[in-house]
């Protein structure tokens, strides 16, 4: 399963949308490296980059939420922490195996690709709608 940055994932915030597009591209590169049999080191490097970039991205998202006093910040932050834990678990899985297995790829698809789609289309969309309402006097 490959991720695709589609119009329904656009939040309207240029920084956040460009970061989402970058993240989806990096997830696909991780999956491509696994599919091409590039091995454990390549997958670990891709996963490390993904972990670092998500830290940056989540930091930017959370700063924006604080700036606009987003009421569900704590819930959103908890989802980010959940994702970081998933990346850590994937890293541990890679460390224990000789290379990216089918189970690893399946976990990436389920807990990274699908997670991002759900997260962007629900949590991040809620933030965008909240900001839009604030900027338009309470109207969507």
Image (spheres, rainbow, N blue to C red):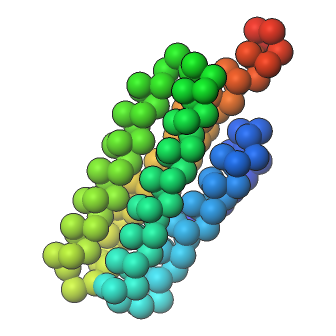
Extreme residue in the left direction? 96
Q: Position of residue 88 (x, y in %)?
A: 28, 59
The front one of 60 and 46 is 60
Residue 139 appears in the picture as rendered: yes
Residue 103 can be seen in this image:
no
Give coordinates of residue 123: x percent, y percent. 55, 32
Q: Give coordinates of residue 97: x percent, y percent.
A: 20, 79
Residue at the far top in the pictured view: 138
Task: Name above or below for residue 140 compared with residue 120.
Answer: above
How far from the left and from the top, in percent, is residue 37? Answer: 41, 90
Q: Residue at x 37, y 33 (%)?
A: 78
Q: Is residue 75 left or right of residue 18?
A: left
Quarter occupied by the C terminus: top right
Count of numbered marks: 0
Side of 114 where 21 appears, left or right: right
Q: Is residue 130 left or right of residue 62?
A: right
User: Where is 135 relative to 63, above or below?
Assistant: above
**Picture quadrant where residue 87 is located:** bottom left
Q: Nearer the viewer, residue 5 or 14?
A: 14
Where is 58 relative to 104, above or below? above
Task: Name which residue lies at 52% across and 66% down.
Answer: 27
Q: Is residue 62 above or below residue 89?
A: above
Q: What's the residue at 63%, 62% (across, down)?
A: 22
Quadrant in the picture for residue 45 = bottom left
Q: Nearer the viewer, residue 105 or 74?
A: 74
Residue at image point 41% right, 25% down:
74
């Amino acid at each position: 399963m490959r991720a695709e940055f589609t119009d329904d994932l656009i939040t309207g915030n240029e920084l956040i949308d460009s970061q989402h597009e970058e993240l989806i591209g990096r997830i696909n590169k991780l999956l491509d490296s696994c599919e091409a049999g590039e091995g454990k080191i390549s997958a670990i490097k891709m996963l490390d980059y993904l972990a670092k970039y998500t830290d940056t991205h989540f930091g930017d998202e959370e700063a924006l939420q604080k700036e606009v006093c987003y009421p569900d910040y704590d819930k959103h932050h908890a989802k980010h922490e959940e994702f970081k834990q998933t990346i850590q678990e994937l890293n541990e899985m890679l460390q224990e195996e000789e290379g990216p297995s089918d189970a690893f790829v399946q976990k990436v698809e389920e807990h990274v690709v699908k997670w991002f789609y759900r997260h962007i289309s629900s949590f991040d969309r809620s933030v965008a709608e909240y900001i839009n309402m604030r900027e338009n006097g309470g109207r969507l």
